[in-house]
Amino acid sequence: VQLVDSGGGLVQPGGSLRLSCVASGFAFDNYAMGWFRQAPGQEREGVAGIDSRGHTIYTDSVQGRFTISRDNDKTTVDLEMNSLKPEDTAMYYCAAMEDYRGSPSLSGGQFDYWGQGTQVTVSS
């Protein structure tokens, strides 16, 4: 099983980034996916989730600014981030969980597999 995160970088406040995660080694179609983040000294936070049918969920602080999407043919999950703020600065991780519940999740403890992370820094 492998999840490879990419797309992070340094961006000015108000800017945009698109994170991508390529998955392999498991039945991607049957898995819910999520993006999580962790800033130094803070707990890991669920940012966005998408279930196997494409239903999505977002934490309140990113609602309307971030969009999660998946491509089952390419086994990828992306996170489009717009109107970025300094408080969005963190290491971002994608994660996968077998979709027993049939609904998206932001609870990290439910996820089985994790990417290596990609750093997002929002600063002027």
Image (cartoon, rainbow, N blue to C red):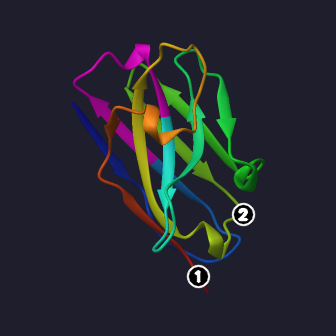
In terms of sequence position, does the residue under pointer 1 or pointer 2 come before the other?
A: 2
Looking at the image, which residue is at 42% across and 56% down?
7
Q: Quadrant of the N terminus?
A: top left
Few, some or many residues within 10 Å of mark 1 (<14, 14–19, 20+)? some
The residue type indicated by label 2 comes to Ser
Q: Percent x, y for residue 80?
A: 59, 48
**Number of disc labels:** 2
Looking at the image, which residue is at 64% across and 72% down?
87
> Is residue 78 rendered magenta in the image?
no
Residue named by callout 2: 83
Q: Percent x, y for residue 33?
A: 47, 31
> Is residue 26 rendered magenta in the image?
yes
Boundaries of the magenta span? 20-33
Label 2 sits on a secondary structure element that is: loop
Q: Nearer the viewer, residue 109 or 90?
A: 109
Looking at the image, which residue is at 57% across and 29% down?
50
Cα separation, mark 1 vs mark 2, equals 12 Å
Query: In the drawing, does residue 90 fall left or right of residue 113?
Result: right
48 versus 42 height, above or below: above
Q: Quadrant of the C terminus?
A: bottom right
Q: Nearer the viewer, residue 30 or 78?
A: 30
The numbered disc on residue 86 is: none
Looking at the image, which residue is at 58% across and 82% down?
123
> Could you say which quadrant of the image residue 112 lies in?
top left
Residue named by callout 1: 123
Q: Nearer the viewer, residue 53 or 104?
A: 104
Q: Percent x, y for residue 15?
A: 65, 68
Few, some or many residues within 10 Å of mark 2 (<14, 14–19, 20+)? some
The residue type indicated by label 1 comes to Ser
Label 1 sits on a secondary structure element that is: loop
Q: Percent x, y for residue 95?
A: 40, 38
